[in-house]
Image (tube, grey):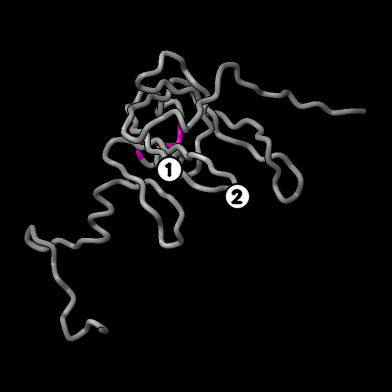
Amino acid sequence: MAIYKKQVSLGGSWVKSADLKTGMKAKIVSETNPIPSNFQNKDGSMKNQDVCKIKFEGFNEIFNVALNKATTNGLIDAFGEDSVNWQNKVLSVETEKMRVSGKAVVVLYLIPEGYERIDDSSGYAIIVKTDSINERNQPEVGGHVEDRTKIEDVPF
């Protein structure tokens, strides 16, 4: 006996990240749902991708977009775990050219207001609240950045 699982698919066009420009605005206009991707896990099972529909500034069409982990984690941090709450919020578009498996691609990040994309200590992109960057990197004392380094401690 064969067991079948319902396939979830989305109608509509997929965005081409190369057509987008950093600084554009966007809004998610649907819930985000996991759907099977074209890639496999190490055990051979299909990987899922988190897909939603997005309206981009300057385009009349609404596009399908697979959100990357950095974007998803930033949206969770900004608006909570329920993707219904991610809808109709103004997001900033940020694109980055990179190579993935030797192929030149343009990666899309969607960044909530008051957040920015940085690289973590391992070099992975993360989206964090802007205030948390200042708190970590620039401890303020009395409204001024505290200088904790003494010239004698500089190794060169």
SS assignment at label 1: strand
Which SS class for mark 2?
Answer: loop
Q: Which residue is at a point 35% across and 35% down the rendered structure image?
A: 22
Above or below, 20 relative to 71: above
Q: For mark 1, does the 10 Å Cα neighbourhood hold few (<14), some (14 to 19), or many (20 or more) residues?
A: some
Q: Residue at x 72, y 51 (%)?
A: 42
Q: Position of residue 24 (x, y in %)?
A: 33, 29
Instruction: Identify the main secondary structure in magenta.
Output: loop
Question: Which corner quadrant holds the N terminus?
Answer: top right
In the displayed structure, would residue 9 be above or below residue 109? above
Q: Position of residue 125 (x, y in %)?
A: 43, 50
Judge from the rendering whether residue 125 lies leftward or rightward of residue 145; answer left or right.
right
Residue at the extreme left: 142
Q: Which residues are magenta?
A: 78-82
1 and 2 marks in contact (CB < 8 Å): no
Q: Is residue 87 left or right of residue 155?
A: right
Q: In the image, is residue 68 above or below residue 156? A: above
Earlier sequence position, callout 1 versus callout 2: 1
The amino acid sitting under disc 2 is: Gly
**Going by the image, does 22 lie left or right of 151?**
right
Q: Check disc 2: other Cα within 10 Å, few if <14, some if 14-19, many if 20+.
A: few
Judged left or right of residue 37, residue 57 is: left
The percent position of residue 48, horizontal first and vertical second, equals 63, 37
Look at label 1 and name its amino acid: Glu
Is 81 within the magenta? Answer: yes
Q: Quadrant of the C terminus?
A: bottom left
What residue did someone put label 2 on? Answer: 102
Residue 70 occupies which quadrant of the picture? top left
Give the labeled residue for mark 1: 96
Where is residue 34, by image quadrant?
top right
The percent position of residue 8, horizontal first and vertical second, equals: 66, 23
Q: CA distance from mark 1 to mark 2?
A: 15 Å
